[in-house]
């Protein structure tokens, strides 16, 4: 009898594994992921980038943030206002307030992107070799980027990449997945 693999069972397994990572491992692998990200021209040349600040042992983004600032790339973060997630311009860490799920976000509904983002760098619970992204099960990024033409780059640790993940029509597909081992591109 074939076993039906659900998104939820994959989520649970991957989240338990990620929870068990030590801070030193996360930092080391995140630094390797940053080095691999630098191999993507679309990252180097992007003018506007949606980034995230990690929660729950997600890949760290500190080095990405510092690099992008040094290159004067505009950084946006997801922010939740009036029941909706939007991309909000990020200026200073000191201004951030708590958002849903332990995230940090811009305090005011201002500085939303005009037109389109060049690039979106997103965390994930898992990614497949076929560029499907698995999130926490809330569909946050599926909704946030459903209309976006941004190049989408998922960041994950090597163990988060699976052969296959169930795909639904609303699911966001990645253009690149970057791990500590290298870059997968469509
Ligand atoms: P995740 O992407 O976080 O892993 P799912 O893909 O399972 O989560 O989606 C979670 C929920 O969000 C689903 O019930 C799905 O129908 C809903 N959803 C996702 N994208 C959209 C969308 N663009 N519009 C409306 N609902 C959506
Ligand atoms: Mg989804």
Image (tube, rainbow, N blue to C red):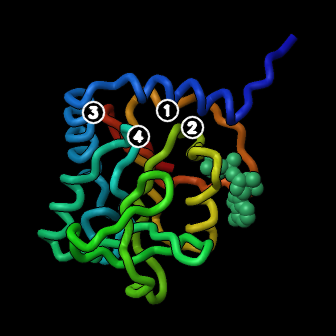
The residue nearer to you, when weighing 73 against 81, is 81
| Spatial CA span between label 4 and label 2 | 20 Å
Q: Is residue 182 above or below residue 86?
A: above
Q: Is residue 39 above or below residue 157?
A: below
Q: Position of residue 185 (x, y in %)?
A: 45, 48
Mark 1 or 3, nearer chain start? 3
Helix, strand or loop for disc 2: strand
Position of 34 compared to 132: left or right?
left
Classify residue 56 by image quadrant: top left
Q: Which residue is mark 4?
A: 56
The reply to whether callout 2 and callout 1 are in contact (CB within 8 Å) is yes
Q: Which residue is mark 3?
A: 26
| Spatial CA span between label 2 and label 3 | 20 Å
Mark 2 or 3, nearer chain start? 3
| Spatial CA span between label 3 and label 4 | 11 Å
Mark 4 or 1, nearer chain start? 4
The residue mark sitting in front, 4 or 2, is: 4
Mark 2 or 1, nearer chain start? 2
The residue mark sitting in front, 4 or 1, is: 4
Position of 5 compared to 13: left or right?
right
Q: Which residue is mark 2?
A: 128
């Amino acid at each position: 009898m074939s076993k039906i693999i659900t998104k939820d069972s994959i989520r649970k397994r991957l989240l338990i594994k990620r929870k068990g990572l030590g801070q030193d491992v996360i930092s080391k692998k995140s630094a390797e992921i940053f080095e691999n990200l630098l191999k993507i021209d679309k990252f180097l040349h992007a003018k506007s980038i949606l980034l995230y600040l990690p929660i729950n042992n997600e890949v760290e983004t500190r080095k990405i943030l510092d690099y992008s600032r040094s290159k004067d790339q505009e950084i946006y973060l997801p922010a939740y206002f009036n029941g909706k997630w939007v991309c909000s311009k990020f200026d200073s860490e000191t201004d951030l307030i708590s958002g849903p799920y332990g995230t940090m976000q811009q305090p005011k509904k201002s500085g939303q992107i005009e037109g389109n983002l060049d690039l979106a760098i997103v965390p994930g619970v898992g990614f497949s070799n076929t560029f499907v992204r698995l999130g926490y099960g809330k569909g946050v990024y599926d909704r946030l980027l459903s209309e976006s033409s941004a190049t989408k780059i998922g960041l994950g640790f090597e163990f988060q990449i699976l052969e296959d993940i169930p795909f639904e029509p609303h699911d966001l597909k990645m253009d690149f997945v970057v791990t500590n081992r290298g870059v997968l591109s469509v």
